[in-house]
Amino acid sequence: MPSAHLHLMVRAEIVNPPGVNDVKAVRMFMHDLVDHVRMKILKPARALWCDEPGNEGITADVLLTTSNSIIHMWNYDDGTGRLDFDLYSCAPFTPEEVIEYIQKHFSVTKLNYRFIDREHDLVDIF
């Protein structure tokens, strides 16, 4: 596993995406993620609901001592949604442990990801 400067990007299709009443749960998801990947919080997680027509959903972030993580979710009228997630860190982690954590908390129907080593360039890790 590379030693540092790792960037995981996840795009997932989900069913039953979190709604306006789930903002606190998404904030806790981001907070608990930090422990799950053995990192430390620099600034506590926050989450907000966006009610802009056509852009409804939750955005959340957490600042880490080693970098940051952010998630955006869009809710569609048919009960499905999309989740975009980024974790950038100077501390080591694996994409598998993060993807399993996401799948544990959301009803994922399709998931794609990129894992990049940004230490000296933008190198895909497979």
Image (tube, rainbow, N blue to C red):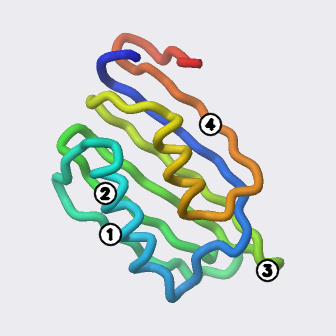
Q: Say which amino acid is labelled 3.
A: Asp
Residue 116 coordinates in the image, percent (x, y): 49, 24
Q: Say which amino acid is labelled 1.
A: Arg
Q: Say which amino acid is labelled 4.
A: Tyr
What residue did someone put label 1 on?
Answer: 46
Q: Residue lying farthest bottom?
A: 21
Label 3 and label 2: CA atoms lie apart by 28 Å
Q: Earlier in the sequence, mark 1 or mark 4?
A: 1
What residue did someone put label 2 on?
Answer: 62
Residue 20 coordinates in the image, percent (x, y): 54, 86
Check disc 3: other Cα within 10 Å, few if <14, some if 14-19, many if 20+.
few
Measuring 49% from the left and 52% from the top, which residue is drawn there?
Answer: 101
The vertical placement of 58 against 84, above or below, is: below
Q: Nearer the viewer, residue 32 or 84?
A: 32
The reply to whether discs 2 and 4 touch (Cβ–Cβ < 8 Å) is no
Q: Earlier in the sequence, mark 3 or mark 4?
A: 3
Residue 28 coordinates in the image, percent (x, y): 36, 69
The vertical placement of 66 against 92, above or below, is: below
Quadrant of image for the C terminus: top right
Measuring 55% from the left and 44% from the top, which residue is drawn there?
Answer: 99
Q: Quadrant of residue 65?
A: top left
Check disc 4: other Cα within 10 Å, few if <14, some if 14-19, many if 20+.
some
Check disc 2: other Cα within 10 Å, few if <14, some if 14-19, many if 20+.
many
Label 3 and label 4: CA atoms lie apart by 25 Å
The reply to whether discs 2 and 1 touch (Cβ–Cβ < 8 Å) is yes
Is 39 displayed left or right of 26 in the figure? left
